Amino acid sequence: MSGDRELPSNAKAYSSDVYRQIDPVGFYGEYIRRQVRPDGRKLRAFRTVGVSDLLEGTAGSGRPLGDGGTITASVRLTAGETHVHCTVRAVPGYSDVTIPLAPGGDNAVSVAVELPKQVQTYVYDANGNSANVHFCVSTLLETVLNCEEVVPTRQLRFAELLREEGAAAPDAVCEYLVRRRFGWKLELNILCEEYDGNLLDTSVLAASFALRKATLPVVLLDTADPANPYRLLALDQGILEQASCGDAKAVALLRSNRRAIEKQLSVQLSDESMLGQLLGSSAHLGRALQLLALPFTVTFLRFSDETFFVDPTSEEERLGTCVSVYCLRGADGSSRCQPLNLMCCPGVTPDVYRCLQQVATDLIDCIANTEF
């Protein structure tokens, strides 16, 4: 989208900092009449999105799975000067409760969006300070991600994996995990490190990209430790390397968990070749999270009755109110869109929304395919 950048020929005439501060609407109006903004973008241009995988190339070493779980994805997303960091943590847990929980009381996915104090002071729109918008963003994401049509919860429960695989009878390790109702919960933590507008889109994008990288650890049950006979471990390169060097404890751990590993990875293993099979591919250190769809949003600032522009900066957010297009994009490429008016933006008629939706769909088609 950098190709959409264009400066008016007489930009210098309107670049006065004094004019910009005293009459920001007039200052922007001079640019918008030429269908550009002071940063050079056209009205429908999204800032260049960059995504980096912060866990790429890292390896564990037989880490225990405590109550805090383990981070399985960590990405940093940038859009201009807005920087957002999202982590996905897989938290193991048992459930001995047999009575049904209240609806919504046992969400498989939780989302927290954090704005440091120095960032909160920059979040404004025409109605005033909007520092609480991160609560709206976290609630939206948590509601969406707990839908079965987005993140199927069967993959998070060991008993469901066992039922799907069927065939061979479970061993002692599998029976223990099923009896204790072992499962995973996913915790997404989104931190806005630098803010220059558009918290909603950047947070949703960061969450979707992080989920694409997320895996569920292969859980092992260590029954050989007298002090802690039912300790949970995550299968990782460290355990495999110890076993390949002949470490008797590591070899015994893998063999006692062979059936459980098979169920979690949907593979067939034998005691003789198991180590070679697992060492042969890093994909055997975890299973990719199954995602049936991912959420995306595109936010527009309403500058005037007829002028909306995409992906507002912090300065631009103060010139009006924002409305967004929410899109649930399926793994098959299908999309379902609807208006999302968190900031109570006026003047969004059905005809206006249809125009915004077309712009948003084109942008999502481009951004959603970002490789990293």
Image (cartoon, helix red, strand yellow):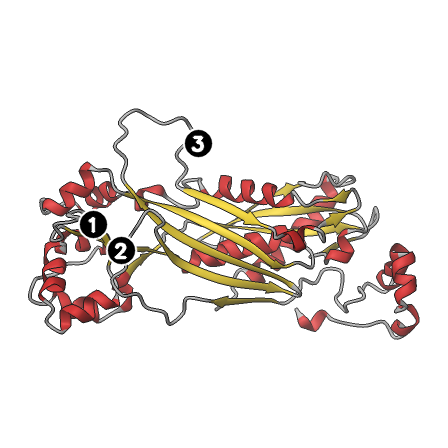
Depth check, front residue: 69 or 355:
69
Residue 164 horizontal side relative to residue 272, left or right: right
Identify which amino acid the numbered label 1 is placed on: Arg
Q: Earlier in the sequence, mark 3 or mark 1?
A: 3
Question: Does the CB distance between marks 2 and 3 fall below 8 Å?
Answer: no
**What is the number of the mark on residue 104?**
3
In the image, residue 336 sits, relative to residue 208, either above or below, namely: above
Mark 2 packing: few (<14 Cα in 10 Å), some, or many (20+)?
A: some
Query: Where residue 264 appears, x then y in whole percent?
Result: 23, 52
What residue is shown at x 72% (from left), y 53% (from top)? 122
Q: Quadrant of residue 239?
A: bottom left
Q: Earlier in the sequence, mark 2 or mark 3?
A: 2
Query: Where residue 226 appears, x then y in whole percent?
Result: 12, 50
Q: Secondary structure at mark 1?
A: strand
Residue 251 horizontal side relative to residue 239, left or right: left
Query: Where residue 299 appears, x then y in whole percent?
Result: 67, 51
Q: Quadrant of residue 277?
A: bottom left
Q: Nearer the viewer, mark 3 or mark 1?
A: 1
What residue is shown at x 28% (from left), y 59% (from top)? 63
Question: Does the CB distance between marks 2 and 1 fall below 8 Å?
Answer: yes
* Separation (CA) of disc 2 from disc 3: 29 Å
Identify which amino acid the numbered label 3 is placed on: Gly
